[in-house]
Image (cartoon, rainbow, N blue to C red):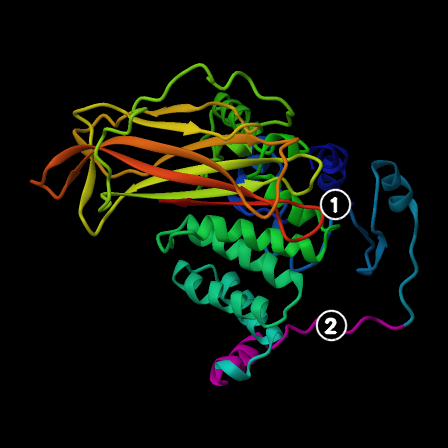
Amino acid sequence: MPGWHARTQSLVEEGKVQVAGLIQEQHPDRCRLFMQWHQMDWPVLVDSLNLLGFSSVPMTFLIDEHGIIRNRRARPGDLAEFLSTSYPAPQEPAPPPVAPDLDGKIETIESSKAETRSAADWTAYGDWLFLRGAEADLMRCVEAYRRAADGGGPPEARFRLGVALRRRSESSHRQPGDFQASIDAWLAALDGDPDQYIWRRRIQQYGPRPDKPYPFYTWVKKAREEITRRGDEPSPLCVEPSGAELAGPGKTLGPDGAEKSGPDPEGRIRRDSSPLINLEITVAPSTDNEHVAARAYLSLRPNEEKKGHWNNEAGDTVIWLDPPEGVRLDDRSFTIPKAAEETSTETRRVEFEAHYDGVAMDDEPLMISGYVLYYVCEDVDGECLYLRRDFLVKLRPSRSAGRRSAGASPR
């Protein structure tokens, strides 16, 4: 976009050209920051669901004064010829655009019985709920897309299900397992259309480094610095990019601490069997067999029902991993620093990468075992404890050709 902006800025100021953009971002506010950084002020539309069905980006369209697309794959060198060409008006003017009666269609769907709705009806209903933009609609939106996908809907329904699940996972309506379910939905969609690179990029955004075409959001830091130096306030982001979204391509890992031993090798620390801390694990695998790797996400959240909270008067949270033979990690030990307050209830997160090229895989999954050690208290005046939580990360072969998938579960 910056290149086209530089080439068209004077033409826009002279009134010769109008420019508009369209993005398929999961997080459109990141585009807003990018536009602010490059001082581009033309309108940008958001198509997170990829309703237009594009399979790759970028795409540049040149549209004449009659509203006719004259070039669908424009390059910078095509602009001069386009502007110097006088295009004839169509013999018959195009009929004025008519907005679809979406409200009427949705009213018909909502008044029908759920068992009579087609996959197309469920998809349209999910689109309507998602595009309204209300967090309260996300529960019904996810259910609508799931019904469409399970009812024989096209791969697009599964992709949109993943988009809605990921949005819900980052909202106040988050459900356990939403992030993993979004990855699984995108993988299922890609199985149905392996050439859909917008869907592939969405998985790679969260996946391992060997599968990345480029670093996705390393520009964010530089953008904020340059905007601040100009004396402006950088546009805020609803969700900060994670480690995977900042990582660049890479096929090798550094030393993984194989010579180190875990902090509780004999398993003597008391288990958090209640639990006071909920553990959620998400695994994003490579999108093909060329790079056998996965990115794992561990999220630790105090159990609200038991009024669990971190005890920050003691030590940090420590995670130890023990991979099977042939599975290489970027590290085996991670430390999450405690908060400054005496007690807190924030979510604590860690990401790590597993590479397993050359490991023989059958129907039995590869298991990375691990445990977390943390200081936690129950209720306001409850007992404060030092506890251990064991877990397994599963790296398993996919049933579909050309791709491996992964999963995870606490234990």
Q: CA distance from mark 1 to mark 2?
A: 24 Å
Residue, disc 2: 96
Residue 43 at what x, y percent from top left?
Answer: 62, 48
Quadrant of the rendered structure where residue 12 is? Answer: top right
Q: Is residue 297 magenta?
A: no
Specify whether residue 37 is in view.
yes
Residue 227 at what x, y percent from top left?
Answer: 51, 27
- The structure residue drawn at horizontal position 72% and vertical position 48%, both measured from the top left corner, is 18
Q: Quadrant of the C terminus?
A: top left
Residue 15 circle label: 1
Residue 123 is left or right of residue 96, and the answer is: left
- The structure residue drawn at horizontal position 92% and vertical position 70%, both measured from the top left corner, is 91
Q: Rate crowding at label 2 as few (under 14), some (14 to 19) or many (20 or more) other CA atoms within 10 Å.
A: few
Closer to the observer: label 1 or label 2?
A: 2
Q: Are marks 1 and 2 in contact (CB under 8 Å)?
A: no
Task: Give the answer, above or below, for where 63 lies relative to 308.
Answer: below
Residue 32 at what x, y percent from top left?
Answer: 54, 41
Residue 131 at what x, y percent from top left?
Answer: 52, 61
Q: Rate crowding at label 1 as few (under 14), some (14 to 19) or many (20 or more) other CA atoms within 10 Å.
A: few
Circle 1: element type: loop
Q: Nearer the viewer, residue 238 or 206?
A: 206
Give the mark nearest the N terminus, 1 or 2: 1
Region in magenta: 92-113
Quadrant of the rendered structure where residue 9 is? Answer: top right
Task: Give the answer, above or below, for where 56 lies relative to 330.
Answer: below
